Image (cartoon, helix red, strand yellow):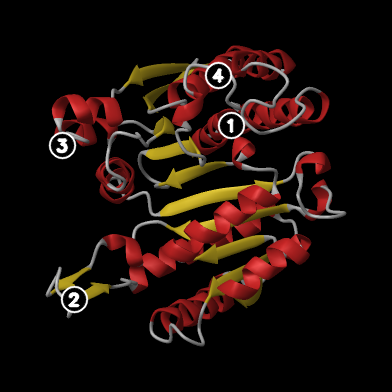
Amino acid sequence: MKSYEIAVIGGDGTGPEVVREAIKVLDAASKKFGFKLNYTDYDLGGDRYLRTNEALPDSVVEELRKFPAILLGAIGHPDVKPGILEKGILLRLRFELEQYINLRPVKLYDERFCPLKDKKPEHVDFVVVRENNEGLYTGSGGFVFKGTPNEIAIQESVNTRRGVERCLRFAFEVAKKRNKDNKLTLCGKTNVLTYAFDLWERAFHEVGKKDYPTIQRDYAHVDATTMWFVKNPEWFDVIVTDNMFGDIITDLGAMVQGGMGIAAGGNINPEGASMFEPIGGSAPKYTGQGVINPLAAICAGQMMLDFLGETEAAQSIEKSVIQVTREKVKSLAAGKLGYSTSEVGDFVAAGL
């Protein structure tokens, strides 16, 4: 029997609650499809930081490096200054474990939950591939004359040919594997960001023309992309973009697919430890009430199984999530599900 070592970071707020339901479903899937998942829990997040004044010990980073996959609940604590946990845990893991792809499927399961008029599941089914290790998020830059009337703040976007090309190649492979419209759209801002996106655009066409001639290449400015997400989401198959633009458009994508309660993502190192998470926050005001939606975390678990090669189990989880979304829950928002967090997890597990 195949077995997989999985690191689990419940994190802050409602994170441990949704992770608990994801594991419930993963265990049901592993039992049905004949493999084993061995979990190792890590105490990382706001509570630990407040106790120890340390966000992420070096030794833990080295331990996490040895796992094929990490399941994360949420990071964010009301008593910790914004940025400390996000940079100290999330960004550090993404960079140090070289999770250079952020993968975000945007898929509508039930038209009731789509805020767009007349849009149905067949209209909202695309994937955003976001570069996850470069751009504005490297922390390059600094202050001059900080705290004075002459203050200057510089934040630099770092884009390397290596980083851009490996992201593009991953996106082309996603489009090829999906075999839906066989189209890859580069989302950028070539008319203003004339250095960074000159590199992106040249690499995009060079790689596509040489190695992926069957994949149609398309381009859209980021502002136009947000318009089309709302007006014609059916135009998109796979989108590839840089770190900042990817961060922004995936949140809009989450709303189009029904909200943060259903949106999951993966931080991918194709050859190393990858981390899967619901993309919503820790929602501390709902902690312990049993009203948070676990479906995004369950979908993150589904993405994790697909990454590990357990595709049949992953597809089975998605089918059950679709059924529960369409037939059970009254809303995807916290407190309005019509059922408790654990009941929703039970429904998905039973659907397997």
Determine which residue is flagged by label 4.
Answer: 21
Nearer-N-terminus badge (3/2): 3
Nearer-N-terminus badge (1/4): 4
Quadrant of the drawing holding the C terminus: top right
Res. 151 mark: 2
Q: Nearer the viewer, residue 165 or 245?
A: 245
Q: Nearer the viewer, mark 4 or mark 3?
A: 4
Res. 58 mark: 3
Disc 2 to disc 4: CB gap under 8 Å: no
Nearer-N-terminus badge (2/1): 2
Q: Is residue 155 above or below residue 69?
A: below
Q: Judging from the image, what secondary structure is the residue with disc 2 in?
A: loop
Nearer-N-terminus badge (4/3): 4
Determine which residue is flagged by label 1.
Answer: 302
Q: CA distance from mark 4 to mark 3?
A: 29 Å
Report the residue that reaches farthest toward the right.
118
Q: Is residue 40 above or below residue 250?
A: above
